[in-house]
Amino acid sequence: MADKKTPQLDELQNGKWPSFVTEIKKAAVKNEASKELLHLLERSYEEKRGHWKHGGIVGVKGYGGGVIGRYSDLPEEYPHLQAFHTVRINAPSGWFYSTDSLRKICDIWERRGSGLMNLHGATGDAILLGTTTDQLQPIFDELSEEGFDLGGSGSDLRSPSCCVGPARCEHACYDTLEACYNITNTFQDELHRPMWPYKSKIKFSGCANDCTASIARSDCAVIGTWRDSLIIDPEEVKNYAASGMNIQHVCEGCPTEALKYNAETQELSVIADECSRCMHCINRMPKAITPGNDRGATILIGGKSTIVQSAFMGWVIVPFMKMEAESDYEEFKDIITRIWEWWDENGKTRERIGETIYRLGMSKFLTEVGLPAVPQMVYRPRANPYVFWPEDEIKK
Ligand code: HEM
Ligand code: HEM
Ligand code: SF4
Ligand code: SF4
């Protein structure tokens, strides 16, 4: 194997971006599977097709998810890739690590796997790329010893993830890290043992900038906001004006025309009831404008990718909810549990929650999970008159 050439991959070591080929070559020095992976990948580049068999079902005792099984379709030629499974590790909130904990993961993985990782998978897990079936249980046992658990896969609650939130960001409207950690712990059973029609994801963003892209990539997005007025520091407004910033231009970017600037007095004011909390003015003038004091989150449902019904972005089901550690996030846990139960009863096989709601209607969904219908849930009212009336609401 060692004398095989990889001319196409070698091309990808040129240029300024860090090269994944260089990284695989580093791992290949110590590991046969990584070496074979390099050669198999070169072959895929030549033939323009993948060389992994369809599917693969492996795991660890007690869990129904967390490991993605994978087998090469050329096991005779690449014996070390006969099995090349992926292990998902539930990452710490906001991906904050100590070098100590990373070293522990690396030590286990160098002994028992390919040495290749993905930091991180798109859902947020730390991904260990490539090991054999017999190594799975020992890897899991050793990771557990060091305090790590597997992430989700299959028709379960996938690993929740969050933005860096209050650890590093002055915009955070709730403690995304704590909420993500707490709620992940509460729903360990749902995460490890798939029990639903399909996958379900939760993502936590501290404000409407949505740095986890929760609105597009999670079935349930928890996006920080506030319900009193944003706070303006008049002195800092003057400092921005003195630095040459065009504050009038910032006001022109306000989607609801809620922000007004008096250039003569250098006073900035907001009509709190009109502000849609879009974050634009705060992003432009972070020293002068901050979110309000009465903070919480908006809960959205339904975000998903294309298959089957088309891609959905999440839409509002709760305009404002307090997200405080002191309450143990009871209100959120209560509503998400009711939603999952409804979906489990009504969802078809491999139907995401967004599609189930689309098929059966918001009105049925809201009534049955116990949420009030409010104007914030729609962009505009329906344009057609095909309205369904429950029989008991019609006066005869
Ligand atoms: C004096 C003549 C007509 C009157 C008074 C009339 C009245 C109406 C009314 C009251 C409706 C129900 C609207 C609703 O449900 O909100 C309707 C629907 C309809 N009418 Fe007429 N109509 C007339 C002529 C026509 C003609 C000549 C055609 C076709 C050649 C037509 C085709 C339709 C269709 C297709 C609908 C159903 C629209 C829908 O709800 O999707 N109508 N009409
Ligand atoms: C390719 C041709 C046609 C298509 C694709 C079509 C499609 C439709 C659709 C989608 C509806 C609404 C059904 C609903 O939501 O309940 C409808 C209703 C209706 N169509 Fe057509 N239509 C066609 C031809 C016609 C023609 C030629 C006529 C009359 C000469 C007609 C008369 C009506 C009427 C009266 C309604 C209302 C029925 C009701 O609301 O009870 N349609 N049509
Ligand atoms: S989503 Fe908001 S709170 Fe979270 S990191 Fe981004 S800007 Fe900060
Ligand atoms: S947050 Fe957005 S909507 Fe609110 S005042 Fe600022 S620019 Fe306008």
Image (cartoon, rainbow, N blue to C red):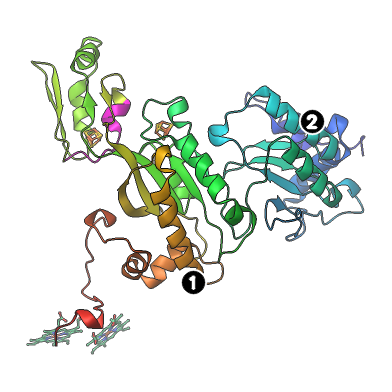
Quadrant location of residue 312?
A: bottom left
Residue occupying image coordinates x 49% and y 71%? 345
Q: Which residue position holds label 2?
A: 107
Q: Is residue 224 magenta?
A: no
Q: Is residue 13 above or below residue 386?
A: above
Magenta segment: 274-283
Question: Of the numbered discs in the image, which one, if any, rests on residue 345?
Answer: 1
Q: Is residue 344 left or right of residue 98?
A: left
Q: Which kind of residue does numbered mark 1 sit on?
A: Glu
Residue furthest left in the image: 264
The numbered mark at residue 192 is none
Q: Which of the pair 181/240 is nearer the observer?
A: 181
Instruction: Say whether mark 1 is within 8 Å of ligand 2.
Output: no
Towards the viewer: 244 or 287: 287
Name the residue at 44% across, 43% down. Answer: 328
Note whether residue 215 is visible.
no
